[in-house]
Image: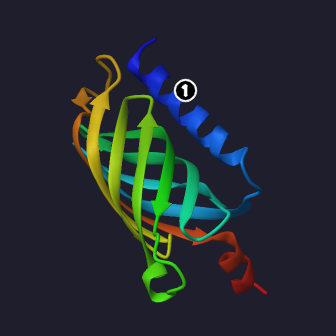
């Protein structure tokens, strides 16, 4: 089993075992952002937020990374899985930010990441990307430092704007 299959299997088992324990509320979000992965990419996609209590929150997402690599336009699919943590009890102000641990993967690399998020809507994360095989994009190798800045907009807000 190669590294990418192991990581995907591990994350799937982890999230499925967690979801089997309790009923979770699911919220849909639209996400837009910026990703630096040895090249700059814009990101557009969607995420699902799974919530039982506001101490530990789970998110799964899918998006498209779009940018220019070696003067050629490129698009890559991306999936992500995050766990948001904040264990301050009964204090609303402290629940405005969460520590974030997660991983993202494309058809070119896998990147574990850590960071923080404000209200689960504005994320700043960093990590290190490991390439899958010898693949790059338009001759550009995608490994090393990985930085993400993402805005997650709940679809409820979008729906309410047009009422």
Asked whether the viewer can see residue 147, the reply is: no
Q: Is residue 121 visible?
A: yes
What residue lies at 47% left-to-right and 70% top-to-bottom? 87
Residue 140 in the figure: left or right of residue 99: left
Residue 145, given in percent of the width and then of the height, sits at: 21, 45
Q: How many numbered marks, from 0 up?
A: 1
Look at 68% across and 64% down and name the residue there: 52
Q: Is residue 37 left or right of residue 11?
A: left
Q: Nearer the viewer, residue 80 or 97?
A: 97
As displayed, is residue 124 above or below residue 130? below
Across and down, in percent, residue 61 comes to 56, 50
Residue 158 placement: quadrant: bottom right
Q: Quadrant of residue 51?
A: bottom right
Q: Residues within 10 Å of mark 1 (few under 14, many from 20)?
A: few
- Seen at 51% across and 46% down, the residue is 81
Given residues 46 and 60, the one toward you in this image is: 60
Q: Quadrant of the C terminus?
A: bottom right
Residue under the image location 44 percent in, 37 percent down: 105
For residue 139, side relative to residue 34 (left or right)? left
The colouring scheme, among rainbow, by chain, secondary structure or one colour, is: rainbow
Work out whether 134 lies above or below 42.
above
SS of the residue under disc 1: helix
* Residue farthest along the front direction in this orientation: 89
Q: Is residue 69 above or below residue 10?
A: below
Q: Which residue is mark 1?
A: 9
Residue 132: x and y in percent read 35, 23
């Amino acid at each position: 089993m190669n590294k990418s299959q192991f990581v995907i299997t591990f994350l799937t088992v982890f999230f499925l075992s967690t979801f089997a324990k309790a009923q979770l509320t699911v919220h849909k979000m639209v996400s837009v952002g910026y990703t630096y992965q040895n090249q700059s990419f814009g990101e557009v996609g969607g995420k699902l937020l799974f919530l039982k209590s506001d101490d530990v929150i789970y998110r799964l997402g899918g998006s498209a990374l779009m940018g220019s690599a070696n003067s050629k336009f490129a698009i890559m699919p991306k999936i992500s899985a995050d766990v948001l943590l904040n264990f301050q009890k009964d204090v609303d102000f402290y629940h405005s930010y969460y520590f974030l641990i997660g991983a993202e993967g494309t058809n070119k690399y896998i990147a574990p990441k850590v960071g923080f998020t404000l209200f689960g809507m504005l994320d700043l994360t960093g990590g290190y990307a490991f390439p899958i095989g010898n693949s790059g994009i338009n001759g550009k190798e995608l490994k090393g430092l990985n930085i993400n800045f993402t805005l997650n907009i709940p679809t409820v807000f979008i729906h309410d704007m047009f009422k």
